[in-house]
């Protein structure tokens, strides 16, 4: 159910009976010395596409860049300013709304996007987009995923370059494991951080996580947990008449 692989007559036919759209978003940023720079959008896209297939809901192409300014001290990272990201999202939703989509499920792979996404939702409602509903779904926060992450990694999951997200993308890219040596990190930090502050505080790019625990062979279980979680949430979502 990929929007990118559909034709406009097929989308027109879809909109005769359905008005839901799943929108995966992520970022292009460092994930420690062993994680993939595309981790956030690769994971969100994979989870969204499988959930879309099961629910028979169209899934848009992923928005592969996000709000990642604090990662810019690490080569390969790219960022969009929060205000610009909000504007981009709002324009995308305006366009989809104009075609008849009304139920938007944003499957997010990057925590730094959250504030801009919520602001875009608020802006559209302020403009009077009646009948539209918006849900922000951080796939790694779904109960099914949190439970599995605790089972597999316990208190070494952390908050960035986590073994959960690395395991999923390792699976997607046919990687089993990569070696990692932990280094000391500060017990806490005042957010948000500049790129310099991030690089000084978290020298490897990880954040209280242990990427050495990541295994590509864990990926299918993590993907299934995330997809089940999404299917449950989306399947039980209320409809705003």
Image (cartoon, rainbow, N blue to C red):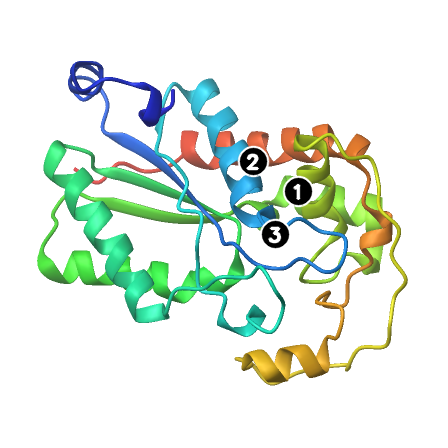
Looking at the image, tell me whether mark 1 or mark 3 is earlier in sequence order: 3
- Residue designated by label 1: 145
SS at circle 1: helix
Please report the residue visible at 9 percent of the width from the left and 55 percent of the height from the top.
128
- Residue 212's spot in the image, x, y percent? 86, 52
Q: Point out the image quarter for the C terminus.
A: top left
Q: CA distance from mark 2 to mark 3?
A: 25 Å
- In the picture, measured across the screen, residue 97 lies left or right of residue 143, that is left
Looking at the image, tell me whether mark 1 or mark 2 is earlier in sequence order: 1
- The residue closer to the viewer here, 61 or 72, is 72
- Residue designated by label 2: 229
- Residue designated by label 3: 37
Label disc, if present, on residue 199 of the rendered structure: none
- Residue 165's spot in the image, x, y percent? 67, 47
Please report the residue visible at 86 percent of the width from the left and 77 percent of the height from the top.
184
Q: Point out the image quarter for the N terminus.
A: top left
Indicate whether 31 appears above or below 234: below
- Residue 129's spot in the image, x, y percent? 12, 50
């Amino acid at each position: 159910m990929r929007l990118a692989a559909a034709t406009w007559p097929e989308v027109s036919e879809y909109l005769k009976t359905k008005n839901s759209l799943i929108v995966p978003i992520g970022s292009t940023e460092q994930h420690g010395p062993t994680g993939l720079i595309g981790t956030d959008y690769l994971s969100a896209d994979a989870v969204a596409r499988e959930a879309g297939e099961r629910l028979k809901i169209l899934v848009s192409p992923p928005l592969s860049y996000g709000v990642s300014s604090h990662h810019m001290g690490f080569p390969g990272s790219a960022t969009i300013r929060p205000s610009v990201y909000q504007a981009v999202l709002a324009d995308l939703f305006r366009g989809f709304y104009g075609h008849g989509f009304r139920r938007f499920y944003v499957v997010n792979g990057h925590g730094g996007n959250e504030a801009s996404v919520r602001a875009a939702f608020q802006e559209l409602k302020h403009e009077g987009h009646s009948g539209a509903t918006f849900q922000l779904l951080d796939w790694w926060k779904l109960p099914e995923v949190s439970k599995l992450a605790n089972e597999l990694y316990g208190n070494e999951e952390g908050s960035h370059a986590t073994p959960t997200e690395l395991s999923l993308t390792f699976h997607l890219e046919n990687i089993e494991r990569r070696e990692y040596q932990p280094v000391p990190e500060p017990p806490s930090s005042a957010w948000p951080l500049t790129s310099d502050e991030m690089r000084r505080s978290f020298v490897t790019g990880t954040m209280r996580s242990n990427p050495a625990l990541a295994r590509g062979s864990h990926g299918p279980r993590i993907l299934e947990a995330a997809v089940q979680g999404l299917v449950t949430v989306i399947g039980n979502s209320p409809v705003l008449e």
